[in-house]
């Protein structure tokens, strides 16, 4: 079943829980130790790290970007990324697939793959690994909230008018966002998108095209037979082999590296951060091979440290440092304010309309219900990977989540555990379910996969603005220490998926940091 296919990805990634920290424990006494000094170290190469690397390099500041994963270069007919219909070791971060009820376990040898599931109490998180971070595997929805929704969720000092005038447009230009052309939507393999739009409008909901960081000409060339299918058969949920997707690695990071002042160090897994006696920042790193074996241990010292490793890993490093005394006097709010962005993922099996197979992707249409900030939500249709025609597709909802979880440090594991309250987001989930049910209609079967395996692909918070950091990501009371990723967000990004807002907030922050802190702090 398609449901199994989607859950298999979740199940496989679950085996990777906590394994990003393995290298240090297995390092032999013969592993060399090296020391390096740098001006600025950035941990993580997703949206926050990519923006930071480019803007500092353009300001003349040399930066080192540490990425635990590998590069994933693409091009026409490439086989860089794995396929959801034929899982292999490239899917999972240093682990193998555990079993879920009714799903057999599929073991894989350890590999520095794309996805890690970080388990928690009540909710798990999907985390990406690789140069480009989450932009490698995200569907690509590039949504900007309205002023009313933004101001409901973010501090009033974060001026929406400026974000709307300067920073959201800047991100859109960098990612070269476009909506799918009508010629493509009218093609045979995009029947599911057309059925969704027609069904949503029949249910009384407005429908619009979703801006995507995609050169849709690649998909049109697939239709013409110039390339093997990737977009047009839905085989793009784990990365687009043909290229044309403007992920962070080929936009922000490529531009940063082109300056000659940005170095991206792959397969460098950070295990600890600390404040040195002289006030600089000390970063402990394992350089690993693709199996996770430690080849070299490094201790890096930097004048400034930017944490952009994603919500789970950024918060983990800070909370570990606080618990072990590596960074004294971190804010009390560290670990709190975590939100799931209201994620709900459904399979939709329709007995009335045939979605066809294969299904073109990744996302074409969405339906925004944004009038009431209390229950604001977005519902989109997403393609399944190439499977037999089972009359099934995917529906995804997310919205303004009100409830918050928190991370707790476990000294025995030297790790953090997310605690998510039972029954959280009940009203938002109910509204998303109502909308999806009306869109699907009475001759449909819906399966809420989030209820079966509670997991979010949009984890947010843990080192949030106002409680742990200021609006520019400066960790309160810590000179030269910054958070510029999803951990900085206040548990939600206002009924939008997080990527565009994370990047826009980072763009705003870097404008100010370059003006005030180059040479003085950096």
Image (cartoon, grey):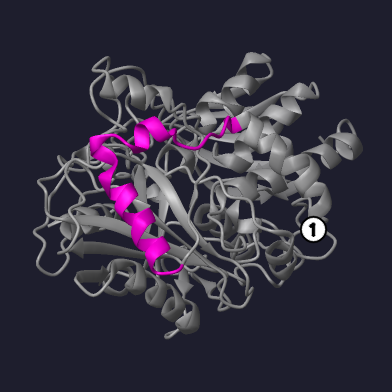
- Give the magenta part as a residue range: 175-204
x%, y% of residue 420? 46, 77
Name the residue located 71 percent from the left edge and 35 percent from the top edge: 170
The picture places residue 282, in percent across and down from the top left corner, at 66, 42
Inspect this view and state whether residue 432 appears. yes
Q: What residue did someone put label 1 on?
A: 470
Please tell me which residue lies in front, 513 or 446: 446
User: Can residue 144 be found in the magenta stretch?
Assistant: no
> Image quadrant of residue 397?
bottom left
Image coords of residue 435 (percent x, y) = 41, 72
Q: Residues within 10 Å of mark 1 (few under 14, many from 20)?
A: some
* Residue sitting nearer the eye, 115 or 26: 115
Quadrant where the image shows the N terminus = bottom left
For this orientation, the residue located farthest to the bottom is: 423
When the figure is inspected, residue 261 is found, relative to residue 502, above or below; the finding is: above
Q: In x, y percent, where is residue 198? A: 36, 56
Q: Is residue 186 magenta?
A: yes
Label 1's element? Answer: loop
Q: How many marks?
A: 1
* Residue 277 shows in this picture: no
Taking 19 as reference, is 47 left or right?
Answer: right
Give the main secondary structure, helix, strand or loop, of the magenta stretch.
helix
Seen in the picture, residue 403 relative to 56 is either above or below; the reply is: below
The structure residue drawn at horizontal position 34% and vertical position 61%, both measured from the top left corner, is: 199
Quadrant in the rendering for residue 263: top right
Which sits in the foreground, 387 or 197?
A: 197
């Amino acid at each position: 079943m398609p449901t199994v296919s989607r859950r298999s990805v979740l199940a496989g990634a679950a085996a990777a829980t906590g394994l990003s920290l393995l290298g240090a424990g297995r390092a032999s006494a013969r592993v060399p130790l090296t020391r390096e000094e740098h001006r600025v170290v950035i941990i993580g190469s997703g949206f926050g790290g990519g923006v930071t690397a480019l803007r500092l390099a353009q300001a003349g500041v040399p930066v080192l970007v540490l990425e635990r994963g590998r590069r994933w270069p693409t091009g026409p007919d490439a086989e860089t990324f794995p396929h959801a219909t034929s899982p292999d070791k490239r899917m999972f971060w240093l682990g193998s697939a555990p079993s879920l009820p009714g799903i057999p376990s599929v073991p894989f040898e350890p590999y520095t793959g794309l996805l890690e599931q970080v388990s928690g109490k009540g909710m798990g998180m999907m985390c990406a690994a690789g140069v480009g971070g989450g932009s490698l595997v995200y569907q690509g929805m590039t949504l900007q909230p309205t002023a009313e929704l933004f101001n409901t969720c973010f501090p009033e000092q974060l001026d929406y008018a400026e974000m709307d005038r300067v920073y959201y447009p800047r991100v859109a230009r960098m990612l070269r966002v476009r909506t799918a052309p009508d010629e493509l939507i009218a093609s045979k393999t995009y029947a599911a998108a057309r059925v969704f739009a027609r069904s949503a409008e029949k249910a009384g909901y407005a429908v619009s095209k979703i801006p995507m960081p995609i050169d849709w000409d690649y998909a049109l060339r697939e239709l013409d037979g110039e390339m093997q299918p990737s977009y047009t058969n839905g085989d793009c949920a784990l990365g687009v082999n043909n290229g044309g997707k403007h992920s962070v690695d080929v936009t922000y990071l490529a531009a940063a590296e082109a300056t000659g002042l940005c170095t991206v160090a792959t397969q460098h897994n950070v295990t600890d951060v600390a404040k040195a006696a002289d006030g600089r920042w000390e970063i402990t790193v394992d350089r690993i091979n693709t199996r996770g074996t430690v080849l070299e241990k490094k201790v890096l010292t930097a004048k400034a440290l930017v944490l952009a490793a994603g919500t789970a890993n950024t918060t983990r490093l800070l909370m570990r440092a606080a618990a072990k005394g590596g960074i004294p006097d971190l804010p009390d709010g560290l670990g709190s304010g975590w939100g799931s962005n209201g994620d709900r993922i459904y399979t939709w099996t329709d007995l009335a309309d045939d979605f066809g197979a294969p299904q073109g992707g990744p996302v074409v249409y969405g339906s925004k219900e944004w009038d009431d900030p209390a229950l604001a939500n977005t519902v989109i249709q997403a393609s399944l990977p190439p499977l037999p025609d089972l009359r099934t597709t995917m529906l995804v909802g997310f919205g303004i989540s009100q409830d918050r979880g928190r991370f707790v440090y476990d000294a025995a594991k030297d790790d953090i555990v997310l605690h998510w309250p039972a029954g959280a987001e009940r009203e938002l989930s109910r509204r998303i379910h109502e909308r999806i049910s009306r869109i699907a209609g009475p001759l449909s079967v819906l399966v809420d996969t989030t209820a079966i395996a509670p997991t979010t692909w949009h984890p947010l918070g843990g080192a949030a603005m106002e409680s742990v950091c200021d609006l520019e990501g400066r960790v309160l009371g810590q000179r030269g220490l910054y958070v510029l990723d999803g951990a900085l967000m206040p548990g939600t990004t206002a009924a939008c998926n997080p990527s565009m807002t994370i990047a826009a907030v980072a763009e705003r922050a870097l404008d100010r940091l370059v003006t005030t802190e180059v040479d003085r702090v950096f």
